[in-house]
Image (cartoon, rainbow, N blue to C red):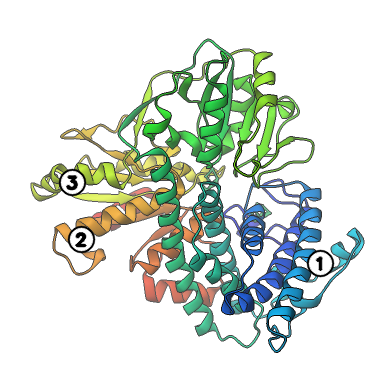
């Protein structure tokens, strides 16, 4: 195996024996093979799309496969074996369709378009030859992987939108085209840089699509005080990012005597008007994803993972973990997809919960969030006044991810060290490093404004663009906004590419720069976009405020 797609890649170089995340080598290799097979599907779908004959199943397969290989989503070997088999069969269907509708059209001559096998042994042999290191040139490899990880992050957002019946053909057509380009050895580094930025453009579109899907189904997030204490009844804990699952779980548990709590990236579900009507929706339990080894233990009831991040479960609570969508783990019960026009069936979790103790209290009190674009724009006059009078001197976008590394205490220290006349704009699980600190407010505007999940970084971009308009600026970089972003997995990559596409410069990325950036590719990002790493809190505060 060789994997360097996340911030915790071993020695900031790459995991080679087993993932720091717990991903075994055989699963890592099969994930590489699945990406290879998916590229084969894209080669055919790309031609079919150009003939107006694209097959929706190929879009769903491509999106689901990219998402399943994202960090901490799926550790189940059999899932990848099944998907590879399904993928090869689907490629055959697409090939037959292309031959039928346009006998003169052929796909480019690529191994991914023709390779096939039927046994696990043959899959494993092939898998060891199609991974990241199959691209020999370090810079081409770096750009190809940067694009691939951006596409994985984008796939996650598109998948959640699909679950809410929102699709955008232009986005999936681009994703097929990009995957096709990644099999083309004649593309230059410049071509790949252009494709990287184009990926960022579709990143903006993908986040916008999901924003539209979430807000049209559940209303616009609004300022909310979220309870972080516990009730007295047994509960179900729901984590990950999928709001459709959240809705169906709340619906099915209503009136059963079972409470529902969010964990980690599901916290922002508390901000949506549609979910506030459920009296058994108690609030949020615990912190960010990597605390689950202790917090799932203490929760005492069943836990539903609707996407990443899943930590390989400890035996003490493994039987209470359930996965759905693209999340998976061997030996853990997987809740099947919803039937056409129907709902998922969460009965097994409810039956399980009834036999469990209520959650053990970890903390009490509330945290405030719900500052997505509509809510912040409703406060625009107040915010603009505060900037004009100097009450707010600077905004800090600190969106992104949290993870285990000790060095991430930087983000807590940075938030604490920021002067009182600054405001943090956040989204994603990065917020758990500072969202329980008593940072106060500025004239009633909290000093930490949480827009929501990592995909709600879109809201932060909308807010920045609106402020640019209000202040009559030509350049988004003239706003008093600094970007100090924490990254971990591939959704942060698509957020970064989206910000670059929008013209945002001088983004600081930490706690380390991605291992997949070769020195030359890193230099392109530094020279053209002012991308930088982080230093000490003191040095960075001085730099940002100078
Ligand atoms: Fe956090 Fe994990 Fe949101 Fe990531 S819970 S690092 O999936 O996408 O952010
Ligand atoms: Fe290593 Fe991260 Fe890949 Fe897991 S996802 S194997 S921790 S680089």
Q: Is residue 95 above or below residue 413?
A: below
Regarding mark 3 in the picture, which secondary structure is present there?
helix
Left or right: 470 in relation to 298: left
Residue 107 occupies quadrant = bottom right
Mark 1 or 2: in front is: 2
Q: Earlier in the sequence, mark 2 or mark 3?
A: 3
Residue 468, label in figure = 2
Crowding around mark 1 (Cα neighbors within 10 Å: few <14, some 14 to 19, many 20+) is: some
Q: CA distance from mark 1 to mark 2?
A: 49 Å
Q: Earlier in the sequence, mark 1 or mark 2?
A: 1
The residue at label 2 has a CB less than 8 Å from ligand 1:
no
- Callout 1–callout 2 Cβ contact below 8 Å: no
Left or right: 474 in relation to 329: left
For the C terminus, the quadrant is bottom left
- Residue at 64%, 47% in the rendered image: 72
Residue 380, label in figure = 3
Residue 351 occupies quadrant = top right
Left or right: 516 in relation to 387: right
For the N terminus, the quadrant is bottom right
- Locate residue 102, reporting x and y percent: 68, 84
- Residue at 31%, 29% in the rendered image: 438
Q: Is residue 91 above or below residue 440?
A: below
How many numbered tags mark residues here?
A: 3
- Locate residue 406, reporting x and y percent: 53, 42
Crowding around mark 2 (Cα neighbors within 10 Å: few <14, some 14 to 19, many 20+) is: some
């Amino acid at each position: 195996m060789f994997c360097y797609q996340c911030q915790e890649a071993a020695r900031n170089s790459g995991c080679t024996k087993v993932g720091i995340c717990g991903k075994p080598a055989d699963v890592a290799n099969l994930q590489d093979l699945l990406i290879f097979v998916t590229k084969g599907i894209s080669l055919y779908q790309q031609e079919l799309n150009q003939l107006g004959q694209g097959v929706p199943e190929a879009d769903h397969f491509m999106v689901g496969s990219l998402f399943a290989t994202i960090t901490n989503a799926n550790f189940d070997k059999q899932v990848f074996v099944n998907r590879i088999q399904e993928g090869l069969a689907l490629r055959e269907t697409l090939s037959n369709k292309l031959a039928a509708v346009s006998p003169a059209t052929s796909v480019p001559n690529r191994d991914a378009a023709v390779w096939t096998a039927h046994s696990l042994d043959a899959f494993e042999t092939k898998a060891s030859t199609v991974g990241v290191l199959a691209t020999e040139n370090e810079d081409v490899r770096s750009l190809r992987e940067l694009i691939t990880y951006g596409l994985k992050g984008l796939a996650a957002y598109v998948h959640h939108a699909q679950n809410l019946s929102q699709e955008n053909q232009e986005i999936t057509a681009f994703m097929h085209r990009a995957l096709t380009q990644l099999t083309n050895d004649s593309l230059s580094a410049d071509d790949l840089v252009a494709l990287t930025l184009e990926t960022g453009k579709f990143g903006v579109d993908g986040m916008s699509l999901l924003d539209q899907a979430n807000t049209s189904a559940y209303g616009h997030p609004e300022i909310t005080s979220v309870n972080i204490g516990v009730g007295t009844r047994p509960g179900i804990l729901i984590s990950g990012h999928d709001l459709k699952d959240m809705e169906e779980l709340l619906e099915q548990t209503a009136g059963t005597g079972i409470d529902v709590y969010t964990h980690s990236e599901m916290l922002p579900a508390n901000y949506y008007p549609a979910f506030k009507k459920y009296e058994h929706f108690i609030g949020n339990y615990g912190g960010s994803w990597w605390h689950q080894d202790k917090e799932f233990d203490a929760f005492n009831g069943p836990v539903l993972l609707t996407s990443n991040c899943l930590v390989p479960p400890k035996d003490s609570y493994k039987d209470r973990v359930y996965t759905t969508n693209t999340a998976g783990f061997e030996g853990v019960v997987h809740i099947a997809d919803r039937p056409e026009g129907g709902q998922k069936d969460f009965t097994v979790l409810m039956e399980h919960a009834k036999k469990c103790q209520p959650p053990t209290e970890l903390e009490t009190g509330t945290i405030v969030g719900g500052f997505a674009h509509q809510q912040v724009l409703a406060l625009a006059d107040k915010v603009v006044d505060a900037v004009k009078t100097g009450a707010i001197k600077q905004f800090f976008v600190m969106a992104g991810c949290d993870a285990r590394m000790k060095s991430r205490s930087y983000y807590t220290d940075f938030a604490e060290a920021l002067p009182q006349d600054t405001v943090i704009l956040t989204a994603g699980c990065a917020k758990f490093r500072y969202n329980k600190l008593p940072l106060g407010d500025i004239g009633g505007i909290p000093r930490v404004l949480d827009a929501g999940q990592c995909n709600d970084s879109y809201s932060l971009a909308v807010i920045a663009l609106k402020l640019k308009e209000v202040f009559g600026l030509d350049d988004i970089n003239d706003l008093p906004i600094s970007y100090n972003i924490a990254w971990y997995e591939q959704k942060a990559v698509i957020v970064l590419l989206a910000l670059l596409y929008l013209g945002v410069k001088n983004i600081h990325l930490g706690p380390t720069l991605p291992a997949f950036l070769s020195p030359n590719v890193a230099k392109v990002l530094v020279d053209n976009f002012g991308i930088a790493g982080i230093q000490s809190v003191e040095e960075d505060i001085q730099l940002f405020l100078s």
